[in-house]
Amino acid sequence: MTKSVTTEMHGEIAVIRIDNPPVNALSHHVREGMLRELGAAQENNAKAAILVGRGGTFIAGADIKEFGKPPKEPMLPEVIHQIEAITIPVIAVIEGNTLGGGLEVTLGCHYRVADAKAKLGLPEVALGLLPGASGTQRLPRLLQNPVEALTMISSGRPINAAKAEAIGLVDKVVDGNALEAALEMANGLNNDNLDARRISKIELTMTPELEAVFDGAMVEIAQKAKGSIAPVKAAECARAAYNIPFDEGMKLERQSFLELMVGDQSQALQYMFFAERQSPKPPKDVTGAPRDVKKVGIIGAGTMGGGIAMTYAEAGFPVTILEMTNEALDRGLGTIEKNWARGIKSGRITEAGVAERMSRLSRTTSYDDLADCDLVIEAAFETMEVKRNVFRKLDATVKQGAILASNTSYLNVDEIAAETNRPADVLGMHYFSPANIMPLLEIVRAEKTADDVLLTALAMAKKTRKTPTISRVGHGFIGNRMLTPYLRQANLLVLEGASPAQIDKALTDFGWAMGPFAVSDLAGLDIGYKSRQDQELSEDETRIYTAADRLVEAGHLGQKSGSGFYAYDPEIRGRSENSAATEIIEQVRSELGINTRAISDEEIVERTQFALANEGAHVLAEGVATRASDVDVVYNYGYGYPRWRGGPMHYVDTVGLKHVAAKIAEWSDSAQSVHWNPSDLLMTLADEGKSFRQWDAENS
Ligand code: 3H9
């Protein structure tokens, strides 16, 4: 077996190379190899050793695939301790992604040389962990700036090499060959004063001023963490570096790391790490290569069309936007320009940058101008009639081989495809509003969609930095379909006695970015109203939304009209109780003869979350989604589901499917039975003592 860590002598300097594709993670053999090769360099009296990664990246962190398996010595903190203690100078060559345990390895080294394009960070909190190989103890000692150290440790955000140099994290930044620069440095070094380069030896002292800085920072970190515990724990360890000696700090860090590792949050976040990498992978039966896309057409310059056009222009594509009238184009392009220009103030983009993006956009009212597009995405009005009409025109004008996509959020893509003579070139590309910001792209693989068309949509997701999930055709696909039972339970709970504010609070306390009633007000209550009018809902179903419908009929359309479930103050952009809504709700309850009762937050969470997962299970059983983890990706990236809970399917796994199934069975057997359609898949998994995670492992 080839070694993953090898040494090459450059004169008196040992260049130790780490080669563990794809990201040089610190797997057991790498940890062992580093100690072996460094030990040999010391024994052979090398003048210095240089640690460098193969493939343009240093080390992207601990090997996440080893988490949860029995630990194997040497453990990383010990490896780093031994690197620091070695008697010859060790230089780290920081290139590419130098993250987590990788950055911690550089902190054990005596010198750090960085490539100008390197990214340095401690992203452990994104996995629900904290830097567990001395990062919380060595980084504050090296930087001597508690705010910078706390920010890196608790936010998980990587920084670039220039910033790293500015805050004292690296000794030198090189725009060129970092290894050459490290060799030059090594040849000029002696090991006389190596102790001064050992970061663990640096002493930190707490002062009353620093205590105040930490107090303020801790409050901010807890707020930003939004229920995630790792950032707070990580910051507490970093603060302790000022109060206790290094060895004690290491013990605290280790203990906190291990506690987090076995907790539900870290388990969920680790699961999401793999789920989001799994979701863009095409199904096994799909073969071929993506088509070439050079030019993109967008039908519709409204909110969705505009956002999608921005997405492609930001990724460098020339985009032609089609609208029915020049006035609509003026409005749409005006909004796009305004949206981009907003970034000028905050420094996200320059005026020239906005101009450059605008120059990628062309406008037209004629389908002929879309003829040479390689991909056309329709974001027109959401009715089948409109979509059919658009696709007929596209079929008649756009060149053969082009991909024709619909941004429909509910409609049947097979029916849309059947309107053309090339259904194999048609698929759904469902973006989420605002499309230039929201990361999710639900790709709808229709019955006849060709493999290379699906692969092209996946490739475009990557190029435009979206997280894609593949769905099959079905009303509302994965995400919107699951919303219906979720909103049904929320509205039922209001009828039964909970207030919209109680429900929203219970769900934001659970971790959702927004509660269902605040979201409905934001989207506009007239949207749900119209959709209910368009569908033939049963009497039972219509009854649930009586209060919501009455609100619309009384002119409470949500934020846009100043009131909906809540009242909105445009001055402070805050919301408060809408007494008119409270009155309407009370009146509806009395008309429907409902005896209200006190409803616990626990019931709110269980009914809404279990309804979501139950529908997710239907989606899986019908083959609309392939993996439970895809469903979770959809909810994380498209609907503001708390990532540290993993997603609706992972959440019910954590609760235990036996309990979930028992609750659903109980509700299905009660007065609310008509509102439940228990999933056979969920019930069977519960009976068999299995989880959705196991189902994924067995079925994909
Ligand atoms: C840590 O370090 C703890 C320590 O403090 C303490 C320890 C005691 N391990 O993302 P990509 C795989 S915690 C194993 O598509 P990109 C990934 O699954 C760790 N595997 O590429 C994928 O596999 P596949 C702290 C890993 O170029 C493939 O590599 N570090 C790891 O878009 C390509 O990944 C982090 O949290 C890993 N550490 O992005 C960094 N990383 O092809 C996590 C990746 O089979 N990693 N893989 O699906 C990342 O953020 C990104 O992967 C990175 C590259 C930015 C590096």
Image: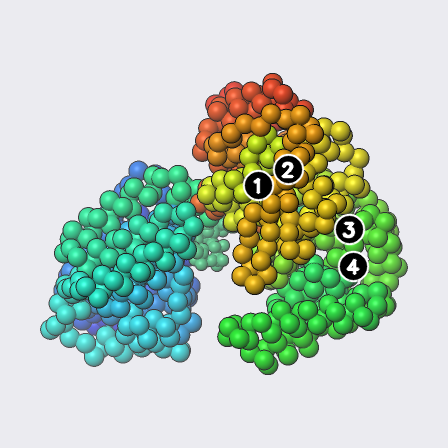
Disc 4 target residue = 401
Task: Report the residue that reaches farthest toward the left.
Answer: 192
- Identify residue type, mark 1: Pro
Compute the Cα span from label 3 to label 1. 28 Å
Quarter location, residue 300: bottom right
How far apart are the two marked residues, 2 and 1, measured between alpha carbons? 10 Å
| Residue carrying label 3 | 382
Dots 2, 1 in contact, CB < 8 A: yes
Amino acid type of disc 2?
A: Ile
Q: N-terminal of the two: label 1 or label 4?
A: 4
Q: Which residue is mark 2?
A: 585
Kindly identify the amino acid type of the residue bearing the numbered disc 4: Gly
Q: Is residue 236 above or below residue 49?
A: above
**Dividing the picture into quarters, in which one does residue 482 lie?**
top right
User: Mark 2 Cα within 10 Å, few/some/many (few <14, many 20+)?
Assistant: many
Give the CA distance from mark 4 to mark 3: 26 Å
Horizontal placement of 63 versus 487: left or right? left
681 lies left or right of 120: right
Q: Nearer the viewer, mark 2 or mark 1?
A: 2
- Which residue is the site of mark 1? 500
Label 4 – label 2 distance at C-alpha: 54 Å
For label 1, being within 8 Å of ligand 1 is answered no
